Image (cartoon, helix red, strand yellow):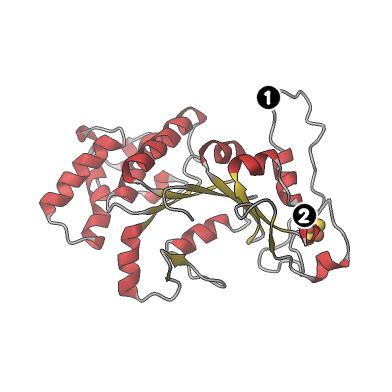
């Protein structure tokens, strides 16, 4: 990821997006591959080093209601990461809480209230304040608006955008919602069954997708200028189990552009499509 960018991660439910996000912040162990942060391999970091890294890498969860401790006040919730991850004094922590509650669009009168006293949108604002409390560099936003009313989703996205500018944040933005991904991301990674199939700048991916799975995903997006979407690609077959993915290309059991035995036998490697920023793993581009 590039510092300051919003990198999207998109794919169907159950494809492994959230697992990847939780692995990046150290909430799940990597079962393969590795995680590097600013050039440092962190997959096997010691507990002490992971504690330091948690200051730099924070997460916002999909469902704010279940991510906020119902027995804590808003002030305690926002202050908690500072208590565990910094050596800031109580006065410094209090000052930061007051700064944050204002930055996320709530007021000091909200600090003594419990999570259940807030709407979903307000709860997500509190969760965002908690994530930013220790001034991280990278924030994993795991479906941060999916559990919210449509009417408040745009407000939360705008808040995340404003805070990115203010704190020079890098976001890993996980979503199944392609319209949200297109709106907020600089680049997008497309995942199928725990494996990336295509990575590209957002405009290029939406204008000229290369991977057959990306094409199918994007073809399902309703277009304002079309009555019936006659170009929609309907994927045949059920989604295989991520625990037991197909050999070769993981998409071969449903691919509309299947080209033969090599799809079943060889896992395709990433190839550059146009420039270094657009890469795709499909035998069509070998
Ligand atoms: Fe389809 Fe074969 Fe490409 Fe996989 S490698 S996406 S099965 S054409």
Image vertical order of residue 37 relative to residue 255, above or below: below
**What residue do we see at 48% from left, 70% from top?**
29
Q: Quadrant of ligand 1?
A: bottom right
Visible residue check, residue 269:
yes
Q: Is residue 261 left or right of residue 269?
A: right
Q: Position of residue 15 (x, y in %)?
A: 63, 56
The nearer-to-camera label among 2 and 1 is 1
Whole-percent x, y for residue 238 in the image: 77, 54
Q: Nearer the viewer, residue 84 or 76?
A: 84
Q: Quadrant of residue 265?
A: bottom right
The mark nearer the N terminus, 2 or 1, is 1
Q: Residues within 10 Å of mark 1 (few under 14, many from 20)?
A: few
In the rendering, at what x and y percent does residue 110 appear? Answer: 24, 35
Element type at marker 1? loop
Give the residue at x 42% y 52%.
Answer: 3
Q: Position of residue 112 (x, y in %)?
A: 21, 40
Count the labels in the image: 2
Q: Is residue 126 left or right of residue 235?
A: left
Q: Quadrant of the C terminus?
A: bottom right
Q: Is residue 20 above or below residue 143?
A: below
Q: Residues within 10 Å of mark 2 (few under 14, many from 20)?
A: few
Residue at 51 percent of width and 39 percent of height: 184
Q: Can residue 70 be seen in this snapshot?
A: no
Residue picked out by circle 1: 224
Label of residue 238 in the image: 2
Q: Which residue of the protein is positioned furthest toward the right in this rendering?
A: 260
């Amino acid at each position: 990821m590039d510092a300051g960018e919003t990198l999207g991660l998109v794919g169907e439910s159950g494809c492994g997006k959230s697992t990847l996000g939780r692995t990046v912040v150290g909430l799940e162990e990597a079962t393969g591959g590795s995680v590097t942060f600013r050039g440092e391999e962190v997959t096997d970091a010691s507990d002490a080093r992971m504690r330091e890294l948690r200051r730099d890498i924070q997460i916002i969860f999909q469902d704010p209601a279940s991510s906020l401790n119902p027995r804590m006040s808003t002030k305690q919730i926002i202050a908690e990461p500072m208590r565990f991850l910094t050596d800031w004094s109580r006065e410094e922590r209090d000052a930061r809480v007051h700064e944050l509650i204002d930055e996320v669009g709530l007021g000091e009168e909200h600090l003594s209230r419990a999570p259940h006293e807030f709407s979903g949108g307000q709860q997500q604002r509190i969760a965002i304040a908690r994530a930013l409390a220790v001034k991280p560099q990278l924030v994993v936003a795991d479906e941060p608006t999916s559990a919210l009313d449509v009417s408040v989703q745009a407000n939360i996205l705008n808040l995340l955008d404003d805070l990115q500018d203010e704190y020079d944040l890098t976001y890993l933005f996980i979503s199944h919602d392609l319209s949200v991904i297109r709106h907020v991301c600089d680049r997008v990674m497309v995942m199928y069954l725990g494996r990336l199939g295509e990575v590209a700048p957002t405009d290029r991916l939406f204008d000229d997708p290369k991977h057959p799975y990306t094409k199918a995903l994007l073809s399902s997006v309703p277009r304002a200028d079309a009555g019936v979407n006659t170009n929609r690609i309907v994927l045949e077959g059920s989604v295989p189990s991520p625990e037991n993915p197909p050999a070769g290309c993981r998409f071969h059991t449903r691919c509309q552009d299947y080209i033969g035995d090599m799809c079943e036998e060889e896992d395709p490697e990433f190839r550059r499509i146009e420039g270094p920023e657009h890469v795709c793993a499909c035998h069509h581009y070998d």
